Image (cartoon, rainbow, N blue to C red):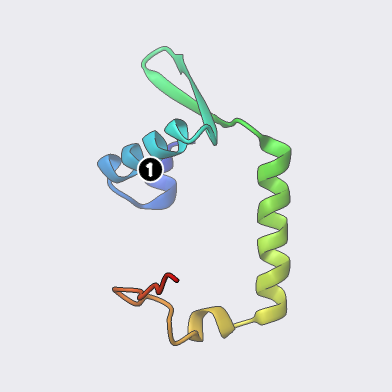
Amino acid sequence: MDLTAHLRLAQSTVSKHLACLLDCGIVTVRTQGRASVYSLAHREATLDLLSAAERLLGLTGDAVVLCPRHGAATVEVSRA
């Protein structure tokens, strides 16, 4: 599957995100001809995380989107 077409994002954007995921150890990559094939490095744990996120969003509904702090440009952090 071509991620750029599927996600409707620029190739450079997808490449930067995949590089980040690769550096973090979330995905692995192998070459296949001229293509790069990415796979989840920890498939079961990633699917567990996504499942938990779906459950949480199912419980909170639109509360996440409607959160007044969502999308704030800056966040103040106080440290003691």
Residue at left offset 29%, top offset 74%: 73
- Helix, strand or loop under label 1: helix
In the picture of the structure, the residue carrying the numbered disc 1 is: 17
Q: Is residue 60 above or below residue 79?
A: below
Between 39 and 21, the one nearer to me in the picture: 21
Residue at left offset 50%, top offset 80%: 65
Residue at left offset 36%, top offset 52%: 8
Image quadrant containing the C terminus: bottom left
Q: Is residue 77 left or right of residue 41?
A: left
Say which quarter of the image contains residue 2: top left
Mark 1 nearby-residue class (10 Å; few <14, some 14–19, many ≥20)? few
Q: Is residue 55 above or below residue 29?
A: below
Q: Position of residue 52 (x, y in %)?
A: 72, 60
Between 25 and 35, the one nearer to me in the picture: 25
Q: Is residue 33 left or right of residue 26?
A: left
- The three-letter amino acid code for the residue at tag 1 is His
Q: Position of residue 25 (x, y in %)?
A: 52, 32
Residue at left offset 38%, top offset 43%: 17
Between 2 and 30, the one nearer to me in the picture: 30
